[in-house]
Amino acid sequence: MSESILEIRGLNKHFGPTWANRDVDFTLGRGEVHGLLGENGSGKSTLLSQIAGLYRSDSGEMTVNGEKYDPHSPLDANARGIAMVMQELGVIGSLPAGVNVFLGRTGRFAKGGIVDLREMNRAAAAVFEKWELPMPRLGRLTEGMSIEERKMIELARALSVDPEILLLDEVTQSLSLNNRNRLYELIAKYREMGRSVIVITHDIEEMVQITDVITVLRDGEVVGRVATKDTDPDKLRMMMVGRNISGDYYRDDNVPECDGETVLEVRDLTVPGEIEDVSFDVHAGEILGFCGLSDAGIHTVGKAVFGLTSAAGTVHFLPTDVYIKSAPQALANHMGYVPKDRDNEALMIHANIRDNSVLPSVNELRGALGLLAPGKVSSLADGVVKRFSVKTTGIRQTMDALSGGNKQKVNLGRWLAKDLRLLILDCPTRGVDVGVKAAIYALMKEAKKTGIAVILISDELTEVLGMADRLLVMKDGRVTREIRRDEDFTEQAVIGVMI
Amino acid sequence: MPEKGETRKMKNWVFWIIFAGIIIVALAAFQLVAKLVSGNSFLEWSNLKGIISRSAYPCFIAWGFCFLFACGYTDMSIGGVVVLGSFVSCILGNWFGLPGVIIGGLAVGLLLIFINFLIFTYSGIPSWIAGISLAMVYEAIAFLLKISKGTKALISTSLAKEYRILGQLPWCLVILLVGLVIVYFIYNRTTVGLNIRALGGNKDVAEKLGINTKKTLLFVGLIAGILVGVSCVLQQSYAGQTTVKTGLTSINMIFQPLAIYLLAQIIRERINIVVCVPICAFILYAIFNLLTMLGVPSGTLQEACLGAFIVVFGIIGSRKVKGVVK
């Protein structure tokens, strides 16, 4: 075993009556890439947050390089060579990208009280260049940037500290294939430099690919630590959930079902600078997949079809013969949309589960006088919580208290409680564990059986290959190829078109 | 499909050329029409002097709003603070001359706004509720000073003319320009300015990145306090006397600076908001001035025109930002 850089003994953390971590022992070796695996709510993010100085530990101790370590803040952690990229932290939209990289540490660029922005942007650019990250326009406000660009800024922010230990919490889930590969290269470089990385990802195959050691957590306790070379994804799944979950939760057939009644007819959809002349049909009971690299425009397609962004071209919803121009119109015509950016675009994060659950269904829940019936509202929210096994203290619990996977269960569940004809899913399994993932795929299969047309947009190639009947590969805003499930439906074929 | 970067650059150039063209044509047309209807006196030097002098004190309050709103807070008591600050500026001015005018206004503005922020920061009461309560308190104090025997005479006396120079040209313009430079640097180029904006952008992120949010809020109180203090000095120097009533009428005093801030907010995507403030103040008071020349009654129709003007600008402004589509 390599020399340890971080030692954790008997670490505890509880929030009210709930134990987030209990007696956690953990060792990180120098030059080691260490994976943390566990279901949503198992305490992985809390553990990283304790290491990064975001949460104070209730008891237990940590040492870094043999010296006692008890960070009071992320700045404390930075000073000891530890930096973290958080799952759902984000950047400040009203500040430029360059400032976001050094936010909280802008004082080091101040001369006579005035911050030298040029110098700061130069330093930020140097970080992007050193680690070969795609550089955004550093003087531009981040509020108009994509989730992927924002995640890269967060990564640059962590790297700007030049940390000995880099903590990555679900970073790859926000990235498309090309940037994911860049991150893998960065992690490999870190290992070569003798620095250490702790990674959380729900993609078990990815974890096996990039880590040296994996620690598995369940209900806040460490249930195992294994060398990656001595294990496989199925064993890890078993350790993680305590029961056997097969890896083949995707479809096992290769028969495309795209001959049903046409539900949606999209023609020449164009959003200037984003997508151009995108045309396709979606049929009842079909899962139509979209994939592409970061600038391919796949996420724009979902928004434009649901009427969330103004676009040229037509979106014809055939069952009601309506041309969709706006989101309310789409909603009224039995269409649903689950966006990629869960916290900012889908959920009212400070409102409770009950209010979030009923949001797409308020029209259906109105009584004779146009008022919402409290009983019906609670019953719908209860139904979502029960059907999706949301880990919660009740429907009055606020969304920000839930883990990523449980938030996604509410997010998706509220749509599936409706009578839908078409559902647009943009990265539906982003940041969810294998158990939730399996449940989401099962629900997609169920939706397919009941005749719901599904548009599945995803940065994970295995996901679209595993679930779609037809796949539209996009590049530079255009659809470059259509592949049916019974054709050359392989990663190699798709990547060949994407790049 | 052209490269995205190239398209963006091209669009930016096209935008600026069209924008500059529209502004030049609109200004020329506006001035021509205004000169015709106002009997050729609009924007003449004497007229211009009045507009600049009148714009100075609301600019400082509007800059204060830039900091307040940037950190996600509001303060409805600023009008009450200006009334009290102007009183003290007047009294100390008549006693000690120009230093009294300056110290009186600055001290009251700084002290009261800082107290407000101490309350906002540590009480946890929403700032707009606390601000309205404090406005009532400050109005009541001002009213008591006005009617009580001991202070009545002091309050009703105007500031001596020789001490009003800061409200007149060229001094008010000098103060405005110095203020513009200082506020620009604080807002855009200092750690505290960036931290304030981070706090309003996302308090959770700011906290997690190690920004001391309480300390930052108190800095807002300090900066906004100084700006309101300067506006007390300029207000008293311009008007010579300040009237006071109860019933939250002091909020009227912040309506015009608020309108300036809102206008500035609309064009901030293209021009820095701190620079926008004096530009918008000038535009706003030029319009008021023209309306007065045209015989439009102030207090009623002029306010209605101002409201309509803001709505129109708001509509134009809201069309500028393309949503995040990626």
Image: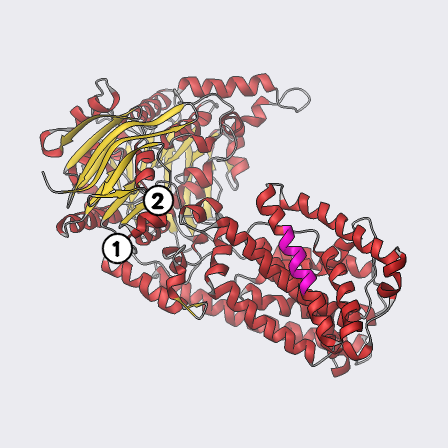
User: Relative to the observer, which residue lies in front, A453 or B180?
Assistant: B180
Q: What x and y, as percent, mark residue A296?
A: 32, 49
- Chain part drawn in magenta: B107-116
| Same chain, labels 2 and 1 | yes
Where, by quadrant of the figure, is residue A426 drawn?
Answer: top left
What secondary structure is marked by label 2?
helix
Q: Where's residue A170, x and y in %? A: 30, 39
Image quarter in which the N terminus of chain B is found: bottom left
Residue tagged by mark 1?
A: A162
Name the dominant secondary structure of the magenta segment.
Answer: helix
Q: Amino acid at mark 2?
A: Ile
Which one is in front, A239 or A367? Answer: A239
Q: Residue furthest bottom?
A: B45
Residue sitting nearer the eye, A251 or B115 = B115
- Percent coordinates x, y for residue A449 in the rendering: 35, 20
- Which chain does the residue under circle 1 lie in? A
Of labels 2 and 1, earlier in sequence is 1
Q: Find disc 2 in the rendering and name its residue.
A: A298
Compared across the picture, whether A102 is left or right of A10 comes to right
Q: Is residue A33 above or below residue B268?
A: above
Three-letter amino acid code of the residue under disc 1: Asp
Q: Distance from label 2 to label 1 (Cα)?
A: 34 Å
Left or right, A219 with respect to B15, comes to left
| Chain under numbered label 2 | A
The answer to whether any part of residue A473 appears in the image is no
In this rendering, is residue A37 above or below B129? above
Q: Residue at x 48, y 23 (%)?
A: A419
